[in-house]
């Protein structure tokens, strides 16, 4: 798995975090507002199994607020 993107801009973060699946994780607005950055990771060519994208929303304290695994890339 590798990191595709790390989103820190508040407007871009909110838009990406609330984007419906399969284009985003589909977090609710109230959850999205609690994050300070959003990490987007994806399976690689050498990873076993089907492709997936993992979205991790992280709060100001560094703790994970929410995460979602979306099938596909």
Image (cartoon, rainbow, N blue to C red):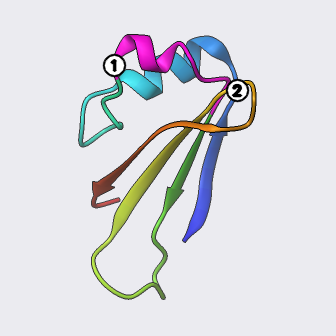
Circle nearer the viewer, 2 or 1: 1
Q: CA distance from mark 2 to mark 1?
A: 18 Å
Assess whether residue 33 is covered by the magenta stretch: yes
Residue at 44 percent of width and 54 percent of height: 54
Residue at 38 percent of width and 12 percent of height: 29
Q: Is residue 42 above or below residue 21?
A: below
Asked which quadrant contains residue 6, the reply is top right
Dot 2 falls on a residue whose secondary structure is loop
Estimate the x, y position of residue 9 in percent, counting from the top left: 68, 19
Estimate the x, y position of residue 17 in percent, counting from the top left: 44, 27
Estimate the x, y position of residue 7 in percent, counting from the top left: 64, 32
Q: Is residue 41 above or below residue 20?
A: below
Question: Is residue 17 toward the left or the right of residue 41 in the image?
Answer: left
Residue at 47 percent of width and 19 percent of height: 32
Residue reaching furthest to the right: 61
Dot 1 falls on a residue whose secondary structure is loop
Question: Is residue 52 toward the left or the right of residue 59 in the image?
Answer: left
Mark identifier at residue 8: 2
| Residue segment shown in magenta | 28-37
Assess whether residue 18 is covered by the magenta stretch: no
Label 2: how many Cα within 10 Å (few below 14, some 14–19, many 20+): some
């Amino acid at each position: 798995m590798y990191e595709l993107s790390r989103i820190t801009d508040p407007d871009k973060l909110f838009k990406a975090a609330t984007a419906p699946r399969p284009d985003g994780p589909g977090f609710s607005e109230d959850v999205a507002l609690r994050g300070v950055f959003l990490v987007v990771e994806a399976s690689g060519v050498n990873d076993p199994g089907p492709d997936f994208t993992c979205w991790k929303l992280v709060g100001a304290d560094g703790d994970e607020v929410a995460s979602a695994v979306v099938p596909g890339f």
